[in-house]
Amino acid sequence: MNSVFRRNLLPQTVLSFLPLTLFFPVGVIYTGIFLFLFSLLYSGDYRAKWLTVKASPLFLPIIGLSAITCCAAILMEWPQDSFLSGFVHYQIYIILLFFVSVGSGDWQRRAVTVFFVGALYAATLYYLNLLQILPKIEIFANYVVYRGNKSILLGILLAIAAGWMLYEMTSLADRRWLWLRVAAFLYVVIALLLLAKSRTASLIFVMLCLLFFLKYLTMSWRSVLWMLGLVLMLTFAWLSASDLRLRVIGTVNDINAFLQGQHISDDGIRLEMYSVTSKIIAEKPWTGHGIGSFSSQYKKYSEGLPSDGTRTPHNDYLFYAAEIGLIGLAALLWIWLTQLIVAWKIGGAPGMRLGMLGVAIMIAGMFNAVLRDAVFGMPFMILLSIPLAGVTRNPVRKYDAKN
């Protein structure tokens, strides 16, 4: 136990417990990140950490995106009120480089376990709220009432945890504990589909399951039973989760109404945001309008519309294209595609976890500004560090299911 608190291992120890903070209010997450950065500074051996960062397959894509944003900052006009915060948010992947600088180790397995414990904790709070015995205090506010990005994040975290649990269940060498893994998986999934109420999270979970089956499905009775069980579970969730079902149906109706020029509901307001943002992009498709310019540009096209005054289009692809152009969007996609390529190369448990995270962030980015808002961005950086730490630019398939 004392070894994990040695000076050189302290950053790994702190990082391994950060996944648990993701299920608490944002202030707890930031406190954990501050403690990590302090421990990283205290641990020393900066040259080794720098060499580890340089060897990461994401180093060049991340530096590429940062270089493009720096060029945009130098060459384009600065909005007075929003440039600095916007510029800082574009550097969010830099924090991932700090995380992966600690290298690989036992902390990665511990971090996965801690993440699963956090997911079980979150699911328990949803069940307690269903039973109306969860205290209505601020620390539980986003479990009691579906509100804002933190509530969406909780659903996404449960979806990712469920995807990772699915892989763990099917890769266990010791089948004596399979029933316990299955119970934990169902415990999290039921809370996700019936109580979390997030359309984005439910879609991510379905896509993660699809990714898993496409990669590992074999022509065996066991695979057929797994797939049949998943289909039955999703069918049950669709029939039972009235709130989620109504929101999905409402989304479909909003799409049809929007295409026909009719009135859309508040839930469908994103469609209006996407339409207005596409007009902004069309003005300067290659370079964008500059960092922090979205709000002022949006006002030009949205006067009198319900979405007037919005700060992001709730879509990272459109947001990057509007502010730093298709060049900046290409840099972002370079990072995301590199994550998927690395996941394929390393294989095993780390590869599946990284692949699922890559799919999750690309889907979440379609409906939320997951990188523009640190509420989403920081948790993704923490989770990405678990499979990416220790991976070099030319990784080999050296991992097995127990890592």
Image (cartoon, rainbow, N blue to C red):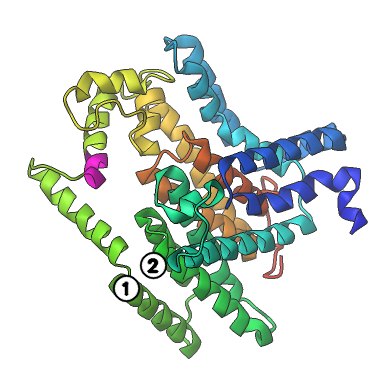
Task: Please report the residue visible at 42 percent of the width from the left and 27 percent of the height from the top.
Answer: 327
Picture coordinates of residue 240 (x, y %)?
32, 73
Picture coordinates of residue 199 (x, y %)?
35, 56
Q: Is mark 2 on a helix, strand or loop?
A: helix
Question: Does the CB distance between marks 1 and 2 fall below 8 Å?
Answer: yes
Q: Is residue 347 above or below residue 30?
A: below
Q: Is residue 216 magenta?
A: no
In this rendering, does residue 170 appear at all?
no
Query: In the rendered image, which quarter contains the C terminus?
Result: bottom right
State whether the magenta stretch is mostly helix, strand or loop: helix
Q: Check disc 1 and give the amino acid type.
A: Ser
Query: In the rendered image, which quarter contains the N terminus?
Result: bottom right
Could you classify mark 1 by the number of other residues whose Cα lies within 10 Å: few (under 14), some (14-19), or many (20 or more)?
few
Residue highlighted by disc 1: 240
Q: What element carries label 1?
A: helix
Task: Please report the residue visible at 43 percent of the width from the left and 50 percent of the height from the top.
Answer: 152
Label of residue 194 in the image: 2
- Which quarter of the figure has residue 231? bottom left
Picture coordinates of residue 168 (x, y %)?
61, 72
> Which stretch did the figure color magenta?
266-271
Q: Observer-nearest residue: 286 or 184?
A: 184
Q: Observer-nearest residue: 353 or 43?
A: 43
Q: Observer-nearest residue: 254 or 197?
A: 197
Q: Which of marks 1 and 2 is nearer the N terminus?
A: 2
Q: Is residue 267 magenta?
A: yes
Left or right: 32 as drawn, with respect to 216 = right
Task: Please report the residue visible at 30 percent of the width from the left and 62 percent of the height from the top.
Answer: 243
